[in-house]
Amino acid sequence: MGTRVTFVSTSAGWEHPRTSFYTDHYELTMLQASLHSGAAHRKSVFEAFARRLPDGRRYGIVAGTGRLLEGIANFRFGDAELEFLKRTNVVNAQTLEYLASYRFSGDIWGYPEGEAYFPNSPILIVEATFAEACMLETYLLSVLNHDSAIASAASRMVTAAGGRPCIEMGSRRTHEEAATASARAAIIAGFDSTSNLEAGIRYGIKTVGTAAHSFTLLHDTERDAFEAQIASLGDHTSLLVDTYDVEAAVRTAVDLAGPRLGAVRLDSGDLVAQAQWVRRLLDDLGNENTKIVVTSDLDEYAIAALQSAPVDSYGVGTSLVTGSGAPTASMVYKLVSRTDDDGTFVSVAKAAKNKASVGGRKYALRKLNERGIATAEVVGVGRRPEDDGNDRPLLQQFMKNGELLPGWTGHEGVLRARRRHADSMAELPPVVNRLQRGEAAIPTLYEEN
Amino acid sequence: MGTRVTFVSTSAGWEHPRTSFYTDHYELTMLQASLHSGAAHRKSVFEAFARRLPDGRRYGIVAGTGRLLEGIANFRFGDAELEFLKRTNVVNAQTLEYLASYRFSGDIWGYPEGEAYFPNSPILIVEATFAEACMLETYLLSVLNHDSAIASAASRMVTAAGGRPCIEMGSRRTHEEAATASARAAIIAGFDSTSNLEAGIRYGIKTVGTAAHSFTLLHDTERDAFEAQIASLGDHTSLLVDTYDVEAAVRTAVDLAGPRLGAVRLDSGDLVAQAQWVRRLLDDLGNENTKIVVTSDLDEYAIAALQSAPVDSYGVGTSLVTGSGAPTASMVYKLVSRTDDDGTFVSVAKAAKNKASVGGRKYALRKLNERGIATAEVVGVGRRPEDDGNDRPLLQQFMKNGELLPGWTGHEGVLRARRRHADSMAELPPVVNRLQRGEAAIPTLYEEN
């Protein structure tokens, strides 16, 4: 995929929205009660992890971290927010005073965006006072759960496509801001481009598109529509050929654009059979270089089924933005360690049935065999796991004393995450290429103190 | 639900984000090509509708319209957007010039937010030039597809809960902005409150919450945590009792808070059995007025199963924000009519297999029997259907010549949509109360010219 252009340069000027109210009410009442008891100032370690992968999946892909870090750096309570909290009696005066000067000043570590994860991988670790860390719970989980669900699905589609470009075009099937985040996550997981203009301007991702059925219907004849499109967008454009009769449309397209016609797009019907006879027809008409794009309700399984057909690229919509059956990554954010009155760290964990967690700060590395293939996810509890030389440490530091460390956010963060995804996938065992349901590709092993 | 407080007053100050880039690239290339052919200025009718309901559902609920209308009123291309489109060669100079002065100046009609819909109900109708209307496709579908999916799931949960309050608490399981829209959609469909603070400040929805497991784990003992919470939030607070041992926690809670303890929250385990013995224990301890809230991975089926248990309210998360198996409403936006060179309207429709649509401007009414119960969705093609006196017209006008008509947006719009939902549900046949999979509750009948 080296020679394809996936990025354009970004525009400045996108202002981060208010992030401090992407918060559940209970985070502020906990803050109030812990300020009252004094425990708010205990040093705490919170961790985000998923107890399991979506049913049958072999791996997940971490995404959203760059977006999240930008948002945490902007997490502030202004006059409008404080006034609302006061007027609706969410919290008391002492808490409002604390919130007025809130600024995250802790450390954040985690798996870099684009990295593969497995059950109980410590994906994000927040070290701060309880007061500072507890308030990030909802926002942090929203971003990671959404973006990771999309990237995890996207990664499987890219694998199924086996090098043929995948185009993200699902914006219309999800919330408008989730759409932009989905385009970003898809690019990280190896998609080639997106239809979403906001993802283009905000993250510098290449956008693509030509025309819908409405454009054909707008004109008196299909020929009029194709003529207008070719005259305006050039003969290398992509023409949508299934509004009326596909064969007639392909013939009209070639008649008008000649051998330089860029592509025809098929958006309905039996795509495998159709791609085959459309390819033959194009070749017979002398259009060997005209490509075939397919775009009708594709998911990783449909893509796999189309691999034997003469298709040049896949446009993926609904299935991508809904996580292909797993629209959320089910990550949780748990307090795993905090100081006592003497300042000593104490591991903590709840005992609730089916939701028990492992207390203690986690460390992680990916165990690799002599050929550089991953064999296990090793999670150290309270200490770094043993590294036998081949192994790859997984945790990176993203924030130090509340300051963002460079390279993880913005356009640069997306580029870096895309490389991380490609490198991590190359290191996983071949079972990750199987779409069938099964166990996690590698086991998660705990090394405890 | 009359006496419960679901709304608080809103705060001013939330600025609508840029909406013009919630757009697919191809809308702008279509604009360019149609400006070239001149067809951009043809008057057009686009319609948003769903060809089918999610598998097995009896009805859907329209949501998002209020949010969408505010966004359309703000749909503008500023310097940053135009500079991006120019630099990345998305469109040519003529198109940039058109976009610089873009302002939607058409009419918009549709089903009011909160209304029930069925297959092929004409949910939103946009009448404008092709140029003006085609550009709204992606944004319009994003909002309607997301919010309607959430409202449709929420409505079933509210029905299953049979009058017991449902609390929306799924923010952490979906994109942070989708979370706010989900809270809004849930309230429209009859939820009582939300945990989401942004929904509180933006739409005046009541927010609720007390504490998570981390608050208990933060303190040296569960007793310390409960004591701190009661001291700070009052004895009428809700205590989370499943961090360690539920029975011990309930006894500690009652010991500390006394008979005025507001509620206990159960978040794990066998909720039916647990609610029953916790109720008996509370009663035995003299806490007949202490309520039981349950919150563990509930969906409409789990709620129905809990109706026999002594539960006072349901907190719903993941299942709500992911549409309970149907995360998108699969609405499409199709050109159904446009003028020809003489200015005469011509019905248009594509013939693509499995995706054929019905051309012509639609009108709609809900046919009611003598008892006021809905018996059919009647869609008139090109003309208003016959009204036999009992029937209820469904289309309302939202925008006229680009101006928003009052009452559909903001806090007022949410209130009105919530009433519309309640009224529409009361009018549907009893089959809508069944959670089992089946056909649409009423048939959609076309009346053609």
Image (cartoon, coloured by chain):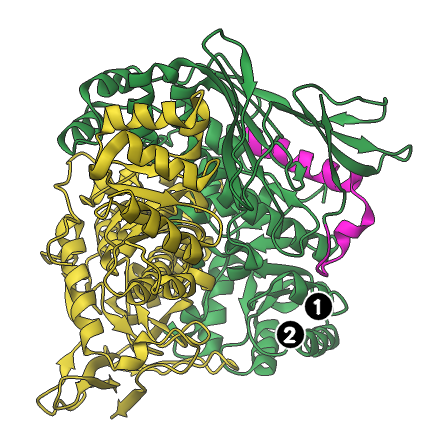
Chain colours: A green, B yellow
| Residue type at tag 1 | Leu
**Placement of the C terminus of chain A among the 4 image quadrants:** top right
* B226 or B166: nearer the viewer: B226
Magenta stretch bounds: A412-439
Foreground: B295 or B381? B295
Instruction: Looking at this view, name the residue that lies furthest to the right.
Output: A370
Say which mark, if any, is on residue A306.
1
Q: For the residues marked 2 and 1, what is the alpha-carbon distance in whole angstroms?
A: 8 Å
In the visual, does B402 lie left or right of B429? left
Instruction: Identify which residue, A383 or B289, lies in the foreground.
Output: B289
Residue A222: x %, y % from top left: 47, 77
Q: Which mark is residue B220?
A: none
For the residue labelled by badge 2, is the local secondary structure a helix, a strand or a loop? Answer: helix
Q: Is residue A190 above or below residue A387?
A: below
Percent position of residue B268, x then y: 47, 47
Residue type, numbered disc 2: Leu
Q: Are marks 2 and 1 in contact (CB under 8 Å)?
A: yes
Q: Are marks 2 and 1 on the same chain?
A: yes
Label 2 belongs to which residue? A271
